[in-house]
Amino acid sequence: MRYISTRGTAPKLTFEEAMLTGLARDGGLYVPETVPTLSHAEIADMAGKSYEEVAFQVMRPFIGDTFTDATFKELIANAYAGFGHAARAPLVQLDSNHFLLELFHGPTLAFKDFAMQLIGQMFQAALGRSGDRVTIVGATSGDTGSAAIEAFRGLAAVDVFILYPHGRVSEVQRRQMTTPTESNVHALAVDGDFDDCQAAVKDMFNDFAFREEVKLAGVNSINWGRVLAQVVYYFTAAVSLGAPHRQVSFTVPTGNFGDIFAGYIAQKMGLPIADLVVATNQNDILHRTLETGSYTKQGVTPTISPSMDIQVSSNFERALFDAYDRDGAAVAAQMDDLKSGGFQISQGAYQMLKHTFKSGRVSEQETQATIKTYLADHGELLCPHTAVGTRVAEAHLGTVPMVTLATAHPAKFPDAVKAASGVAAPLPPRMADLYDRPERVTRVANDLAALQSVIRERIT
Ligand SMILES: Cc1ncc(COP(=O)(O)O)c(C=O)c1O
Ligand SMILES: N[C@@H](CCOP(=O)(O)O)C(=O)O
């Protein structure tokens, strides 16, 4: 299995190389050269298996000889051992044909733990073998950062720097990033929005001298390993609802397009997914693009679902690559146009995207009303991102079972949830003292040189 860049000119890499490299050297994102498929019988065989067993079966074809089967099984087992639910990603029925996939039972209460816990294990194993040391720099709108810090804190071969937009993450998210005491993890509050943080990370990857100097690695969904680990729960959810013998649809609260892209990969692997529905908050570039074929930036507006306050949606590039029949030059040209505000997708590529993804957008008022209604009607307290998902899903319910991804626990967004529902969502007992722990954070200007200099100074 080889990995190629969406911009067509970077060297082909193995899974291990792609995982440790992050952004491709031509600025693109790595994707598998071909997507392996699973047969009807292989998918049917997943029924009744544990999350870990399905994870091995789904991910094994992608990893080549990076790990032996025995090692890979052990890494998977370690990754999910700390989850607070035996099913790891349990399904909850909301209505006759609408289900919630609870992805918030990991250590930091968001779906990011599914991939980050495994990536932490894989980095540790690969770096342990090579004796190398890396500097992970990540951008977050709140959840990737907390999951990354949790997964990598205290690891000897890794320094982790997380850039988050100052004042634009929830207090729980911020404290999850700023209270760990291990000296290898660093929270950097940037004076900007998430797009600024993500652009800075990509600029660091494109600064080859810096990249070599600090041995830069990435754990945003730039990293194929992140997307891969998220493919698994589409399989476990669909199989428990009757796949491959019947179709299942998914609605995914979307920002950086990583999670829904994982669903697209599951579909390409042979999982019978009827609809893949993109749900956005009012930062709706993805919905607008799917409606009009024009990908045009409009600036980020803060919302009560802050983790989706994103306009430059990194993984959309991976979808575009397929939409352009894997023509890296076409993707590179569109990404160049994005620097000056946006681009028009060609008719053929747009038709492919329209055919593959449905979409909807939810206002702040609708998000609040949805939180209130789901508590009253279904007894479910939703986080604001999940509320965006369920609201959009409602418009796409039909005869096929619909699964909405519950991407975070409501306790991560206590103020927004309480304002909408009147109910406080308590943190789990293991985090009960989160508000008492001292914080450690560095405020940094939205300036590449300033960020690079903090990173250079702090590397342990
Ligand atoms: C709680 C939550 N929901 C949804 C999303 C959107 O996921 P993605 O960026 O993979 O589209 C995020 C951020 O990534 C998130 O943290
Ligand atoms: N919503 C994310 C933004 C970063 O996305 P990623 O999937 O590319 O890491 C967050 O919570 O940080």
Image (spheres, rainbow, N blue to C red):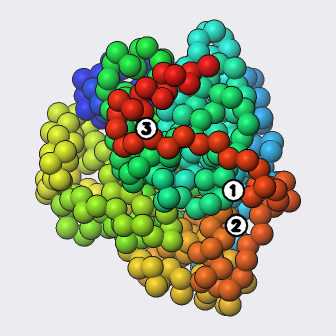
Residue 411 circle label: 2
Find the residue positioned furthest to the top.
131
- Whichever of callouts 3 and 1 sits on the residue coming sooner in the sequence is 1
Residue 53 circle label: none
At x 59% / y 15%, what residue is drawn? Answer: 133
At x 67% / y 90%, what residue is drawn? Answer: 377
Disc 3 to disc 2, how far (Cα)? 27 Å
> Label 3 belongs to which residue?
222
At x 62% / y 19%, what residue is drawn? Answer: 460
Q: Are marks 3 and 1 in contact (CB under 8 Å)?
A: no
Question: Mark 1 is on which residue type?
Answer: Leu
Q: Residues within 10 Å of mark 3 (few under 14, many from 20)?
A: many
Find the residue positioned furthest to the right.
429
Q: Position of residue 447 (x, y in %)?
A: 34, 38
Q: Residues within 10 Å of mark 1 (few under 14, many from 20)?
A: many
- Whichever of callouts 2 and 1 sits on the residue coming sooner in the sequence is 1
At x 53% / y 82%, what residue is drawn? Answer: 368
Q: Is residue 196 visible?
A: yes
Q: Are marks 2 and 1 in contact (CB under 8 Å)?
A: yes
Say which of 41 and 115 sits in front.
115
- Whichever of callouts 3 and 2 sits on the residue coming sooner in the sequence is 3
Question: Mark 2 is on which residue type?
Answer: Ala
In the depicted structure, whether residue 354 falls above or below residue 151? below
Q: Residues within 10 Å of mark 2 (few under 14, many from 20)?
A: many
Residue 109 circle label: 1
Q: Is mark 3 within 8 Å of ligand 2?
A: yes
Q: Nearer the viewer, mark 3 or mark 2?
A: 2
Q: Secondary structure at mark 1?
A: loop
Say which of 366 and 76 sits in front.
366
Q: Position of residue 347 (x, y in %)?
A: 13, 57
